[in-house]
Image (spheres, rainbow, N blue to C red):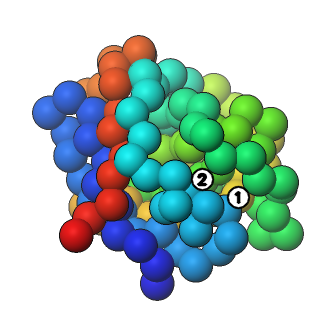
Amino acid sequence: MGQKIRITCGEVSLTAELNDSPTAKAIADALPIRKPGNRWGEEIYFSIPVKMDEAEDARADMEVGELGYWPPGNAFCIFFGKTPVSNGNKPRAASPVNPIGQVEGDATLFSQCPNGAEVVLEKCN
């Protein structure tokens, strides 16, 4: 797999592994990134300084703990539960996202992050 990163929001700090996709590599090259996160149900998203097109494997249905990149908003997305457009308990993006990686550990801990809290993405050594 690809680059290991750390995602921190308040007291929550988890590692994640990026995949080997061109989108994930572009994001790894842009780290570190610090931005206020927006909550949309049980998803945190925020725009990042990476501009990529929708990938061939882009999809809206995601798994808990999966990371995505949302091309229309140049946004990094952390999925940890239901969103307003979910069918059932699994996360669903507003429109297709590029899958870029997976959180290691309990991604539902990100539910502790309030709307607007700063999210830090950084490479692990």
Kindly identify the residue that appears in the image at 65 percent across and 74 percent down: 21
Q: What percent of the width, then of the height, locates residue 104?
A: 30, 65
Q: What percent of the width, then of the height, locates residue 1?
A: 46, 84
Q: In this image, 20 relative to 2: left or right?
A: right
**Residue closest to the far bottom:** 1
* Residue situated in front as seen by the camera: 9 or 110: 9
Kindly identify the residue that appears in the image at 29 percent across and 55 percent down: 6
Evaluate if marks 1 and 2 touch, with contact meaning CB atoms under 8 Å apart: yes
Viewer can see residue 106: no
Q: Residues within 10 Å of mark 1 (few under 14, many from 20)?
A: many
Query: In the picture, which quadrant includes the C terminus?
Result: bottom left
Kindly identify the residue that appears in the image at 77 percent across and 53 percent down: 52
Three-letter residue code for mark 2: Gly
Q: In the image, which disc is placed on residue 21? A: none
Three-letter residue code for mark 1: Asn
Q: In the image, which disc is placed on residue 98? A: 1
Kindly identify the residue that appears in the image at 81 percent across and 64 percent down: 55
Q: In the image, which disc is placed on residue 68? A: 2
Task: Say which label, 1 or 2, has the lower sequence index.
Answer: 2
Q: What percent of the width, then of the height, locates residue 73?
A: 73, 33
Q: In the structure shown, which secondary structural element does the residue marked by tag 2 occupy?
A: strand
Q: What percent of the width, then of the height, locates residue 13?
A: 20, 46
